Image (cartoon, rainbow, N blue to C red):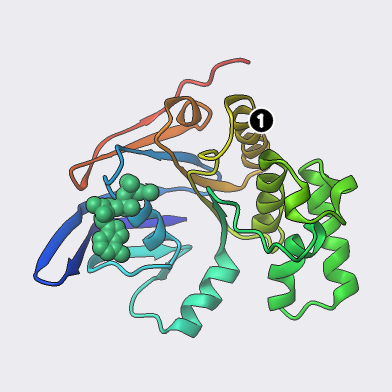
Amino acid sequence: MLVIKDLHKSYTTGKSSLHVLKGINLTINEGEFVSIMGSSGSGKSTLLNIIGILDEKDSGIYNLDGLPIEDLNEIKAAEYRSKFLGFVFQSFNLIGYKNALENVALPLYYQNIPRKERNAIAMEYLEKVGLAQWATHLPNELSGGQKQRVAIARALVANPKVILADEPTGALDSKTTFDIMKLLQEINNEGKTIIVVTHENDVAAQTKRNVELKDGVILFDQMIEQKVL
Ligand code: ADP
Ligand code: MG
């Protein structure tokens, strides 16, 4: 699904340059549920943003679903993002003046799917995350966990190949965190490939494979023993 070889990334501000990713090698197969851990500033978001075609690598190889991600113009990058990727963020990134259903339907709007059809599909996904009764509510009428469920439904609605989540539980209490990770587990059990960035051990423990970044390289990469809950 995703092949990364000897990937490097530096940020240059003024005269100083920061070498954040120093040769990342990572292969993620279809259906995997991977957590990327590491201390603050270790480059987790940088790596996820490159995987999400939101940022560009400096060198190395990145293939997504067999396609080389290389020198894409903004139009092509946006096309690949909407075709292959669903995003979930710590701060939910919902549109405040649109209700839950409209937020979920938004990716379908950009794919020119007619309103009736996109609302029907969006409703299916709201049901999937347990929020059908909240369809007409605005984000500020929802709890943090509910907002993240809406964001997850929105990430899924266009049936992407991979879900990318950057600290999806960072703004949630521990019970809600557990429930959101449980939802992601269910989605993964249906076959969706998911990559979660987190600095929380408990969150990583609810995935199936853990990759740890340190000093710009992968310190370890291991399968997680599944606890019976
Ligand atoms: P993490 O998500 O693991 O906390 P990041 O990938 O956000 O780490 O950042 C890695 C390092 O790169 C940090 O030192 C951060 O300050 C720096 N950095 C991130 N984005 C930029 C940017 N756009 N410009 C300059 N430096 C950046
Ligand atoms: Mg980060």
Residue 74: quadrant of the picture: bottom left
Asked whether residue 193 is in view, the answer is yes
Drawn side of residue 23 relative to residue 93, left or right: left
* Residue 79 vertical placement versus 162 (above, below): below
Pick the residue in front: 96 or 174.
96
Residue at 37% across / 52% down in the picture? 45
* Residue 196 vertical placement versus 56 (above, below): above
x then y, percent, for residue 56: 33, 70
**Residue found at the very far left of the displayed protein:** 15
Name the quadrant of the C terminus: top right
Q: Which residue is mark 1?
A: 179
Pick the residue in front: 176 or 63.
176
Name the secondary structure under disc 1.
helix
x then y, percent, for residue 69: 38, 71
Mark count: 1
Mark 1: few/some/many CA within 10 Å (<14, 14-19, 20+):
some
Asked whether residue 44 is in view, the answer is no
Give the amino acid at mark 1: Asp
Residue at 46% across / 31% down in the picture? 204
**Residue found at the very far front of the displayed protein:** 140
Residue 82: quadrant of the picture: bottom right
Drawn side of residue 49 relative to residue 75, left or right: left
x then y, percent, for residue 152: 66, 50
* Residue 175 vertical placement versus 124 (above, below): above
x then y, percent, for residue 147: 69, 47
Residue at 18% across / 43% down in the picture? 215
Distance from mark 1 CB to nearest ligand 2 atom below 8 Å: no
Residue at 48% across / 43% down in the picture? 167
